[in-house]
Structure formats: C-alpha cells, structure tokens
Image: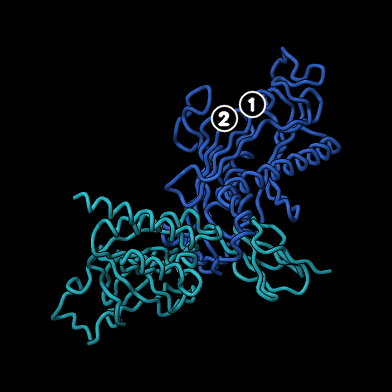
Chain colours: A cyan, B blue
Amino acid sequence: MSYLIEKRTFVIPGDLLAEGDYHAGSNAFKEGSTVYASMVGLSNSVGRNVYVVALKGCYVPRGGDVVIGKVVEMRLGSWNVDINSPYNAILFTSEALDRPFNSRREEMTSILDIGDLILAKVISFDRTRGPALTIRESGLGKIVHGSIIRMTPSKIPRLIGRKGSMINLLTRETGCHITVGQNGLILISGKNPELEALTIKILNIIEEKAHTSGLTNRITDFIKKEKSVLNAEKSKE
Amino acid sequence: MPKKAKSEKLIRRGVRTDGRKIHDLRNIKIEVGPLERADGSAYIEWGNNKILAAVYGPREVHPRHLARPDRAFFRCRYHMAPFSTTERKRPAPSRRERELSKVTRVALEPSILTKLYPRAGIDVFIEILQSDGGTRCAGITAASIALVDAGIPMKDLVAACAAGKIDGKIVLDLNEVEDQEGDADVPVAIMPRTGGISLLQMDGILSQTEFKEALELALEGCKQVYELQKEALTKAYVQEEAPVKDEEKSEGEEQNE
C-alpha cells in the first residue's frame, strides 16, 4: 500500500500527498502512515520527502537569513525591528557596533532611529523568543537609498531562481543592484529612476507568475522589449 | 421558539417557499481573496446571504497577555452589519453575535495547526452584509477559505451546512422564513477529510429519529459545500496555472525548488 502524488499538482489543505513510507516535509503533516498537505500550493517530492511549495504564507525567520526590517521600537540596549514576520526581531547594540556601546556618552538614536530601514542577518531563532539580528557584517546596516518593494515571502525562491539564475539575469540586464530579503522585502538601487521602475515592473510580474514554467525566458523577452522602448525614448530627447 | 399561527404552508407539493426541493441547497458562490489589505479573505453568497470573511495573521497579539507560549492565539469576530437585516441592527455586538463568534472559533480552531506559530495570533473577521438565515454556516465556510487564502497551515477545510424541520419534514439548508416559522434548525460543521464534527447545535424540538435524519442530511450538505470550497480554491489559484501545463511540455522543467 503505497501512493505518491504526482509532482506539481495543485493541492489544498487536507489533500492526500502520499501513503506509506514517506516523510512530511514543509507545509505537510503526517497522520499515521499518510502524508497530507497543510497549505495551498504545488506538491513536490525529493526521494522519500514529500512537501508542498506554498503559494501563500508568512515569513518564518531562520538563522542565517538576510532580511530587510524597519526599526519600530527602542529599548535600553536594543531595538525592536519589524521584519514582516509574526515575530518582531531584536537587535542588540552589541550587534550593531564593533565597539562597546556607551549609553552615557552617546544616544542610541545616533546609530539607528525609529523608522530607519536596515539590512540585517538573522543570528538565531527558536520560536521561544523573538529572532535576534546582527548588522555587524559587511554589506549590512542602515539602508540610505533605493526603492523597497514587497513580495510574498514564499515566492522569494522563485525570484532568486535556480542557483541564482533569475536574480543574476535581472542584475545583468537592468544594471540595478538588487538585495533580496528572505522576508519578502526587496531593495533596488539603480543608476536612474527609469531602470528602477523597470525592475519593479519585472518583480511584479514574477510575483504574479511565480509558479509558472519558462518564466526566466519570458522575463528575458520582456526586458528586451522594455529596454528598446526606453532607448527609443532617450534617442528622441 | 414562539409559536406563530401558520397562515401559509412552507412546503407546497414538495416545493419550498423559494422554489427548492426539500433536499436542495441554495445557490452558493464563493470568491477567494476579494480584500487586498487582509492577509487572506473570502466572499460568499449563499442564497441571499452575503458575507465577507477576512483573516489577519499570524501576527503579534494585542493585548500581549493573551499570547500563548505553545500555540497561536486564535480569535474570531462574527458581526452583522447594521443594514444586513430588515430592521436596522444596532452595530454593537449583541449577545447572539458574541455567542456565534465563540461557536465559529471553536468550529474552526481544530482545523488550524496553531502549534506552528507559538506566541502569535490569528484573527478572523466575519462580516454579514446581508442575512437570510444560516449565516453562521456560511460564515464558517467563508472563514475557512479565507484562512487557506492567508496561507495559514491547516489540517483540513471546515465546511458547514444546516438541516431543519419545517411542516413536519426534515429539510436541508433553512432560509430566514423557514428558520423563523419552522420547527427546528440543526447547524453542523465538519472537517471533511476526517469526518470530524466541529459544530453541532440544535434550536427547536426534534425526536431522536428526526434528529438523526437531520444530522445525516446536514452532513450530506456539508460535503456538497466542501466540493464548492475546493472548486473555488482551485479556480482562484489555478487560473494562473492553466496555461502552464501546456508550456511545461515544450519548455520542460525550469522551476526552482
């Protein structure tokens, strides 16, 4: 008695995924010897591991993730950061500076103020306390320019693509610097506003069509078309 | 229940006041995700009932002390709009609405994997825009879809439907008139995969055999509702998917993950 659902089948919570000697992966759960889906998405399996690629869902922090967050609260020795997840993250002053923070001599607001956007890395998260962040690595810290857009967190893997194929394509073609936060926030900074707008347009397409095949090719065509329009406008001027 | 003098019969030659047969459901139309700002939402038209359900979460719980260390805190609000009834309904939550909020929460909670989001909160808002009997069942049905749309991990959907007794006959899915003039109403909610019953109420008087018959009928109705729920979800998500299947054959696997 063994059953395994076909790959890339649309499933809803409670749908049977597999029966027999299988493990429940992400967005799936096991009851007895049967595995069921717990979210809407597309079924998939690797070996004995059966899981669902979710079409919707919130961001659950994991250690090592790079995220974009907003400082929402300040406490003695730490900031609370909204990282678009069910749990607010915490950033200690020790993780924001290379030197010890002296609360007598300096203000915390001089480092980060409420409303500041930061690019940070999740140090650890075990669901018992809020996730802890750090900005002590190169490239991390306060965001000072660029545009930020939101995407469904579960669609971020698609934006990156297989081995970064999609994101590399975007950076190469648009010349924009794209920083992807695993929590669904994306920072775009380009040479000029037109290119930034184009990138945002493309990201919206990816969001809409995330779970369709042949997306990279379609995006390539789209960029070519849009770019020729941009160039035409420029030559007119 | 107040006994009213029955001037007109509710069933004439096997046909009810709204033209249905005794074992027929009303027309049900479910729309997934009509609300942009909610994490998940659903709109249902169940006969003349018009109901919006919105889901927010998992998110931080306010007030803080309500958060549970081992699971998500699940909250429901059932509310009737002042214009949802023939007489203006005062907008403050009435006793009945509080009760239905609780009943809805208890009906939906067993389907949700709350353990996955400790300390977080999930909020469900059910707003009755127009009511015509059986709003609690329609509300639960819509809320379950909204929960799926919010991407909240669940063990199963919850489908609800009522059965009742009018003119001495057991019928499916009472409307407002039948509910008021009839003898009994039995709303039921089930989790169709396991068959677990998460809501079972009875208003009015039924004999044991009548109750069994009504329950059986309501369960049948729930299964029909479940099929409609599945259909609505598939339609909402797969429409983007549809052209893919053809493309997939020509272009092959290209999907990351």
Sequence-wise first label, 1 or 2: 2
Q: Is residue A169 above or below residue B55?
A: below
Counting from the top left corner in percent of width and height, residue A98 is at 24, 86
The amino acid at mark 1 is Glu
Q: Is residue B41 above or below residue B162?
A: below
Furthest-bottom residue in this view: A99
**Which chain letter matches label 2?**
B
Residue sitting nearer the eye, B24 or A48? A48
Name which residue lies at 58% across and 64% down. A53
Quarter of the image with the C terminus of chain B is bottom right
Q: CA distance from mark 1 to mark 2?
A: 8 Å
Regarding residue B136, the answer to whether it shows in the image is yes
Residue bearing mark 2: B131
Name which residue lies at 76% across and 74% down. A21
Q: Is residue B88 above or below residue B243?
A: above
For label 1, count other residues whose C-alpha is less than 10 Å away and answer few (under 14), some (14-19) or many (20+): some
Residue sitting nearer the eye, B205 or A62? A62
Residue A208 has which mark?
Answer: none
Left or right relative to A2: residue B97: left
Left or right relative to B41: residue B15: right
Quarter of the image with the N terminus of chain B is top right
Counting from the top left corner in percent of width and height, residue B194 is at 75, 56
Counting from the top left corner in percent of width and height, residue A116 is at 25, 65
Residue B176 has which mark?
Answer: 1
Q: Secondary structure at mark 1?
A: helix
Counting from the top left corner in percent of width and height, residue B64 is at 41, 61
Task: Quadrant for residue A29, please give it.
Answer: bottom right
Task: Quadrant for residue A143, please give it.
Answer: bottom left
Q: Secondary structure at mark 2?
A: loop
The amino acid at mark 2 is Ser
